[in-house]
Amino acid sequence: MNRDHRRIIHELAQIYGIESVSYDNEPKRNVVITAVKGKSICPSNTLTSVLEREMQTRPPPPIPHYRQTDKNNGNNGLPKTLKVEPVIDYFDVQD
């Protein structure tokens, strides 16, 4: 079992309160999980509901809108550029 699959098994085992242990050396490394009565839990959300929620398409981020201005004054509607302030180097110690 590859590393990513083992990691997923260990994470799911932690969520469900199940003990998980990896055995053997690479490339034959594998995971054994053991559920203990009274210690293992069943989360309120099912794995499929979480996956469905994660896989839903998300709306695109909002598009910034700039205020329209009069074209006669030469402003194209974009915000004015801010004055660049000098960067202070606090580690430049001069004795």
Image: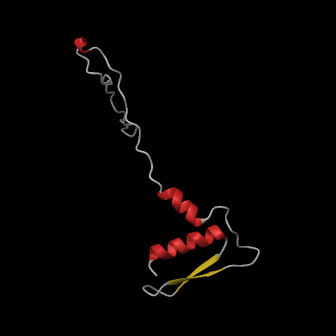
Q: Residue 72 lies in what quarter of the image?
A: top left
Q: From the viewer's perspective, tell me whether residue 78 is left or right of residue 45.
A: left
Name the residue at 50% across, 57% down. Answer: 54
Q: Residue 50 lies in what quarter of the image?
A: bottom right
Q: Residue furthest top?
A: 72
Name the residue at 65% across, 70% down. Answer: 16
Front residue of 93/66: it is: 66
Name the residue at 24% across, 12% down. Answer: 73
Name the residue at 35% across, 22% down. Answer: 67
Front residue of 29/53: it is: 53
Residue 7 position (above or below residue 70): below
Residue 89 position (above or below residue 4): above
On the image, the x and y values in percent for residue 62 come to 41, 37
On the image, the x and y values in percent for residue 10 come to 56, 73
Front residue of 57/71: it is: 57
Labels in figure, total: 0
Q: Residue 93 lies in what quarter of the image?
A: top left
Front residue of 8/47: it is: 47
On the image, the x and y values in percent for residue 11 come to 56, 69
Q: Which residue lies furthest to the right in this view?
A: 38
